[in-house]
Amino acid sequence: MPGVDKIANSLHSGMVRLNKKVALVDRATDISAARLSILAVLTFGGSRTIGALSRIEGVKPPTMSNLVNALEKDGMVIRENTKDDARQSAVSVTKKGKTLLEKARQNRLHYLSRLLETVSKQELKTLEDAAEILLRLAESNE
């Protein structure tokens, strides 16, 4: 398809720039993006071992252990022995962690809503259609 590479380039540039702006909004929650990501994985995906979190987040287990230790110290997660192997622990998000994640989500949504208020009705409809396509692409196995 002609133009696919150009569209891919524009999407990439737009997503990178928007992610940077959203990252600035996340700073208001006083927690790193890496820690927020772990809270999201645990909130929406359930308990995970350090190894599983490492694979999901694309970091080495010692790095993940450090991140989880900090979250645990702050009361955002807890560790419990797994049912299958008492030597291994599963990390779960606490109510405090879920509350912080929701606060960060609300901050992002408020920011994005303010941005969307600056576009025309036609552009807003285009973005609505594009959002559905992007979600579908994000959920595909490609």
Image: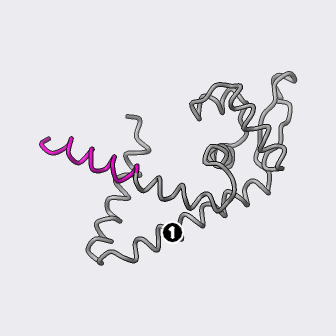
Residue 65 vertical placement versus 116 (above, below): above
Name the quarter where the C terminus is drawn: top left
Where residue 137 sits: x, y (%)? 37, 45
- Report whether 33 appears left or right of 96: left
Q: What residue is drawn where x is 83% and y is 50%?
A: 75
Q: Is residue 11 magenta?
A: yes
SS of the residue under disc 1: helix
Name the quarter where the N terminus is drawn: top left
Q: What kind of secondary structure does the magenta stretch mostly adopt?
A: helix
**Image quadrant where residue 87 sits:** top right
- Which sits in the foreground, 17 or 116? 17
Q: What residue is drawn where x is 12% and y is 42%?
A: 2
Where residue 138 sits: x, y (%)? 42, 45
Q: What residue is drawn where x is 79% and y is 56%?
A: 95
- Report whether 46 appears left or right of 85: left
- Which sits in the foreground, 44 or 74? 74
Where residue 115 sits: x, y (%)? 42, 71
Residue 76 vertical placement versus 99 (above, below): above
Q: Magenta span covers which residues?
A: 1-16
Q: What residue is drawn where x is 46% and y is 74%?
A: 114
Would you name the residue on which mark 1 appears?
Answer: 111
Q: Amino acid at mark 1?
A: Tyr
Give the crowd class for mark 1: few <14, some 14-19, many >=20 residues within 10 Å.
some
